[in-house]
Image (cartoon, helix red, strand yellow):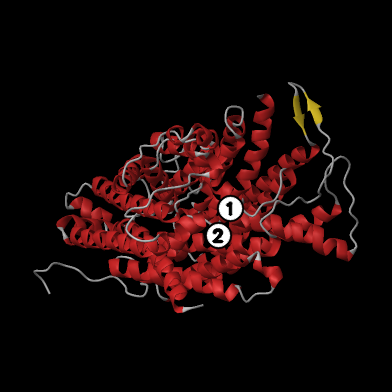
Amino acid sequence: MAELIVYGIVLGSIIALGAIGLTLVYGILRFANFAHGDLMTAGAYVALFLVTGIFPWLGIPDTTFGSLSFGWRMTLAFPIAMACVAAASILFDRILYRPLRRKQSGPVIMAISALGASFIIRMIVIILWGADYHFYRPGVLRPAIMLPLEIKIRPDQILILATVLSLVILLYLFLQRTKMGKAMRATADNMELARVSGIDTERVIVWTWGIGGALAAAGGILYGIDVQLHPGMGWHFLLPLFAATILGGIGNMYGALIGALIMGVAQQVSTFYLMPTYKPAVAFVVMILILLVRPQGIFGGGRS
Amino acid sequence: MEIGGIIAYLVSLAIMAGIFAVFALGLNIHWGYTGLFNIGIAGFFCIGAYTSAMITTPRPEDVSPMYAQYVHQIFGLNLPFIVGLLGAALVCGFIAYLIGYPTLRLREDYLAIATIGIAETFRLIFNNEHWLANGPRGLMGLPQPFQGLVEPRHYNYIYLVVVLAIMVVIYISIERVIRSPWGRVLRAIREDEVASAMSGKDIVRFKMQSLIFGSMIMGVGGALYAHYTKAISPDVFTPLYGTFIIWVMLMAGGSGNNKGAILGAFVVWGIWIGTKFLTDLLPYTLKARAPYIRFLIIGILLEIILIYRPQGLMGEEKRISKMMD
């Protein structure tokens, strides 16, 4: 059980990267981005393309760091894939959402557009890479470290936790210390008011998509390192992402982080009693329970 | 292909388009008239199909002990087709109530997430629980209405009449209901919830009734599909095939317009089948991925509609009252 909780924290930290981006987009653009899970898929597959396609061709050696399951190729692919998905998210906003914003379309029309975008991303992934499972490094031995309480943990998983932690700290510093971060928080509070005080809200939106996309890509890649890649992975993340976002209160970044950890632990612990394929359903049931008891989320957010 | 073959092909196309038109009509009640955001149509599709299948087939134990070893099914009532349709509608209505209860009081997108959740959950349950409805292998040998009337190879003509008749009945009843004061309240809620609440309308109750009504129609659609293909398995009810394409149909035809919903279903189904002929021209290596290329085209079609023609082909009919023109 202790082991499942630790695995749950690892899964939860991956969910957190998606959920933080989702809650930022939700808070600033005010619509449910159903394509967010598929941005995670896109990040994972861009990294796969770099690691197995481009980098071998460039002659970057296929080494691993210590007992980790990856090396230089992944270290380079990680930031590049984040940048690619950030750019793709901004592009999607330009092509799909900005015309709708200009026409003052409602949040539901935006969400339907996002649903369409999610299918477009997934179909492109399947067309390019096929519907099968992929790994960054097939057939690699994964040594485990023994911790007290009979917890087995892989070095990869420790690195995943460290990566997520540093990304969250970076984001915190960005939102608290930089001018753009402050503008983003102001826009999330009240877009009209932000606009009259001279904030360029279109630029804020570009940054929001960039950060949301980059974090989603990071989450997708880390999941690919921890488990595997599959075109449907983003869709399966969608319910836990939304559950975490609602749990934390929409627009509340720290709430989303805590919500994601709870979701990850709930999903992993459920495998003790249920088949692992039921994980998305567990996220769904937990979410319905939250909606029944505290629809505004655990940390209140108040705004809706 | 000789002329008879072409006609038979067109009939099978029209049957599927008619079944999807039923779903589009159900979605039109939710989204077109009330503004309810249901993206778990696949869930009602799945529940409707399985309910009707289990109502109309006998228990495997009653067929033969041998058969019961291979097919597991929690119950089988061996009742007529029409009971299956009604049962599918009732069960879907009840599930809709269960989803609506926690979500209708909240923001509109919570309902969307809850409907996705229910669709995924039911697909997982039917896939994993073998005792319930035979797991991933699904149920087979579903009965069809009026089967003895013609030779089996001409049966599709009969089923086309059945589907179109049910579609027309549903169309007429929605048209009548939507013109009633009840229908006006739904549209008032869609346009301005606060104003309707201030006029003394119990918003959550009206939304709930709309959610249940539309979901019952989707249940009928699921049953019609099940008895057409005679075999169902959980992998049919995916978000792509069970939900997404129906949204594209309604948006293409024009939400808030029942004629538009039907037109959209036939047009988009025609495009979906038409793209099959296009992908057949692809080189062999790409053929395995053809269905995904077709879905990609449908996805792009949706985005184009949303940006350039949000009112769809027909747009919403302005209906105030027959007393005012």
Residue A5 lies, in percent from the top left, at: 65, 29
Query: Which of the 4 image quadrants contains residue A13?
Result: top right
Marks 1 and 2 in Cβ contact (< 8 Å):
yes
Q: Which residue is mark 2?
A: A118
Q: Which residue is mark 1?
A: A37
Residue B80 lies, in percent from the top left, at: 31, 45
Count of all numbered marks drawn on residues in the image: 2
- Depth check, front residue: B105 or B181: B181
Name the kind of residue labelled 2 in the image: Ser
Residue B20 lies, in percent from the top left, at: 39, 61
Assess disc 2: are there few (<14), some (14-19) or many (≥20) residues with their C-alpha within 10 Å of its C-alpha.
many
Residue A282 lies, in percent from the top left, at: 53, 36
Q: Chain of mark 1?
A: A
Q: Quadrant of the C terminus of chain B?
A: bottom left
Q: Residue furthest top?
A: A149
The residue drawn where x is 69% and y is 71% is: B284
Name the kind of residue labelled 1 in the image: Gly
